[in-house]
Image: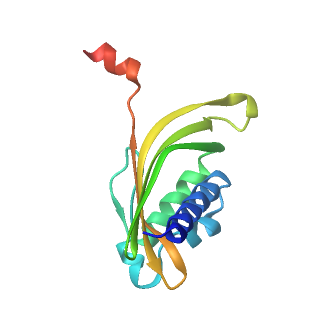
Amino acid sequence: MTEIDVSAVEAVNAEFYAAFESADLDRMGLVWADGPQAEEVVCVHPGWPLLRGRGTVLRSWALIMANTPYIQFVLTDTQVRVSGDQAILTCSENIITAVEESANALTSGGSVVTTNAFIRTDEGWRMWLHHGSPVLNREEDGEDE
């Protein structure tokens, strides 16, 4: 595992979130693996079924972006592991979102624990898998007991 690879994976991960925050589907498309790996791309959005294949995954992002007026991520607990031509980045997404097209309608969108897998391609590191799992509110956990 080299620092250059770790930095490159972190840069692609940052670009993934920047593309999402700016609702830029073209930019999002540049993050995801293409070519021979296109059909191996996998995505699990919180609460969604598993999506397989680059086309299906990018259509899901188009749908989410079209229905999300504002979203911002603060990533914490980020760790990267590189092994050969594959890398795994884990993190916690702390989400700020808006339910309306107004800056006054910002709200906490909760927290998601995420695993992003990357593959080294001729074009550099590309996302191969994104899996987000919602974290239950700790206060809600206590009420159920």
Quadrant in the picture for residue 82: bottom left
Q: Quadrant of the N terminus?
A: bottom left
The residue lying toward the viewer, choosing from 23 and 114, is: 114
The answer to which of 14 and 58 lies nearer the viewer is: 14
Asked if residue 102 is positioned above or below residue 124 in the image, the reply reads above
Say which residue appears at 39% left-offset and 76% top-offset: 85
Q: How many marks?
A: 0
Q: Residue at x 47, y 81 (%)?
A: 121
- Residue 145 at x, y = what percent? 24, 15
Residue 132 pos. (x, y %)? 41, 48
Residue 81 placement, left or right of 19: left
- Give the vertical position of 14 relative to 8 (above or below): above
What residue occupies the far left of the structure in this picture? 145
- The residue furthest right is 103
Residue 139 or residue 84, whichever sits in front: 84
Which colouring convention does the figure follow?
Answer: rainbow
On the image, the x and y values in percent for residue 12 come to 56, 65
| Residue for point 53% across, 78% down | 124
* Quadrant hosting residue 29: bottom right
Residue 42's place in the image compared with 101, above or below, is below
Q: x and y percent of residue 137 in the render?
A: 41, 25
